[in-house]
Amino acid sequence: MKRASAASDDLEAELDHRIGVRLAVLRSPARVIFRGQAHDIVGPRGPVYNSQTSLQVRMSRRAEAFEHWIRTSFVQMNTELENLYFAKEHRAQVIGCGDPIKASLRDEGHAHVVALLAEGNTGEGFDSAYGVLGSVGLYLGALRRHELTNPAREERSPFPEASSLALHVGASLGMAPRFSTGHLATHNRARAGVRKSFTSLRDEFLFIDENTRGILSLQRAADALASIVHLGVSSPVADVMFDAAKQALRDVRRFNDRLMNQLDVERFFYSVRPYYKPYRVGRQEYRGANAGDFSGINEIDLLLGLCRANDPYYAQLLVDKMLFMLPSDQARLRDCMTRTSLLDELLSFVEEHQPADWFQQNALAYLEVCDLFGQAAAQHHDGLVRRFIEGPAADLDERGLEGITASGPPLPVLMHSLEVLRDLRLAADRRDIATRHDDLDKLRRAVRGYRRPAGAPDASQ
């Protein structure tokens, strides 16, 4: 009993100490760090205290040190390794090549991870924690790329400290414990013009930048369509938002074109894509980051009505990607799933309001958005996925094909799944999946002057 009492007293004392420290922080002036100096935040009525603000604009020193390493030595070592691999006759064979560099990358990163894990504090605030999750995720992704870990030959990650840090931070954010698209796209903060990356290769920066431009444009289109939901599809001012959505989708096609024309197929396949492979965090294997891991693309699917949340195939896709998105994106997508689609709303007006000017104008604008979205979806699948992944993969042997996809399943399975998604977005005339072909056809017949774009893609092409 004395031991239990002593342990209880020690725990109570520790809790009192922690509460006291926290209260002292809350009662002290809030501070920012500028050029290495701490400065109190002063408002119009005097100092602003931590109890009055949730603003936390700096990482812990250890988190900042890890971030600096990721942006410098980490990139240099990965780039050296990629150049060694690319100079080989068999570029996919990376085991036994550049081992001293791999050891340095592993050990230097491990030192940062252990320091952060011991600290038990990644810096308060979403941005700091999200940054740490990105740093440890990029580190684990590089270890996987260089075959220092491989889920096919392991039951658990051989890097328990990195796994623990990723699990801790991921759970606190409500996200999967690995790097996601946002870390290298919409939340990839540039410093003096330089973004986070695995390497300094031109093709990686081209891939990151054009993908990010495409994501931002798709989000613009989603924002415009969401505004129409609140206005009502019969509103005469919906034309402004339809025009905004169309311009954003034209931009997506422009960025896709630029990526297809400038990205080197071999460099992408052998030096960029491998960093997006699945890897283990603890015992669990997590798929790689996917360019579609943001809410905007799915908001467009659902708001246009081309995909439906009650479709088992599409619902599974949403469930699988939810934890790979930012919490704010997760909230947007959940809200979108509760809305009536623009297609269903327009179809409800056909019988009674087909002759009305507002119906003809807005239905035509809606169909033009659908056409542009379908063209972008087909362009991405047929021009990017087939050319930059499926094509080069044909030259690999069975061993080289293992783990080739970011999503994890064998390449033929992935390609079939992506074709289904493309055809849903095209509203293709397929009877083996539930597309909106017939509903869109009904709406097209109701709109005077609608002409399907010349050379519009279809599943049969």
Image (cartoon, grey):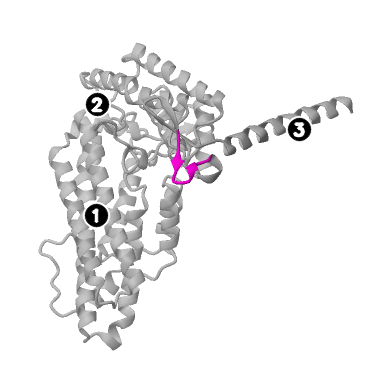
The residue under the point 43% across, 51% down is 328
**Image depth: mark 3 or mark 1 in front:** 3
Residue 236 in view (yes/no): yes
Residue 45 counted in the magenta span: yes
Q: CA distance from mark 2 to mark 3?
A: 51 Å
Q: Earlier in the sequence, mark 3 or mark 1?
A: 3
Q: How many marks?
A: 3
Q: Amino acid at mark 3?
A: Glu
Q: Is residue 343 magenta?
A: no
Depth check, mark 2 against mark 3: the one in front is 3
Residue at x 85% of width, y 29% of height:
5
List the residue tagged with mark 2.
Answer: 200
In this view of the protein, can residue 155 be seen by the observer? no
Confirm or deny contact between disc 2 and disc 1 (CB under 8 A): no
Kind of residue at disc 2: Ser
Residue 331 percent across, percent down from the top left: 45, 55
> Considering the image in quadrants, where does the C terminus appear?
bottom left
Range of the magenta residues? Answer: 40-49
Sequence order check: which comes first, mark 2 or mark 3? 3
**147 and 83: which is toward the camera:** 83
Q: Residue furthest left?
A: 454
Residue at disc 1, secondary structure: helix
Cα distance between the residues tagged 2 and 1: 29 Å
- Pick whichever of labels 2 and 1 is earlier in the sequence: 2
Left/right placement of residue 146 relative to residue 281 reads: left
Residue 377, disc: 1
Q: Which mark is residue 12?
A: 3
CA neighbours of label 2 inside 10 A, class few (<14), some (14 to 19), many (20+):
some
Side of 445 where 18 appears, left or right: right
* Quadrant in the picture for the N terminus: top right
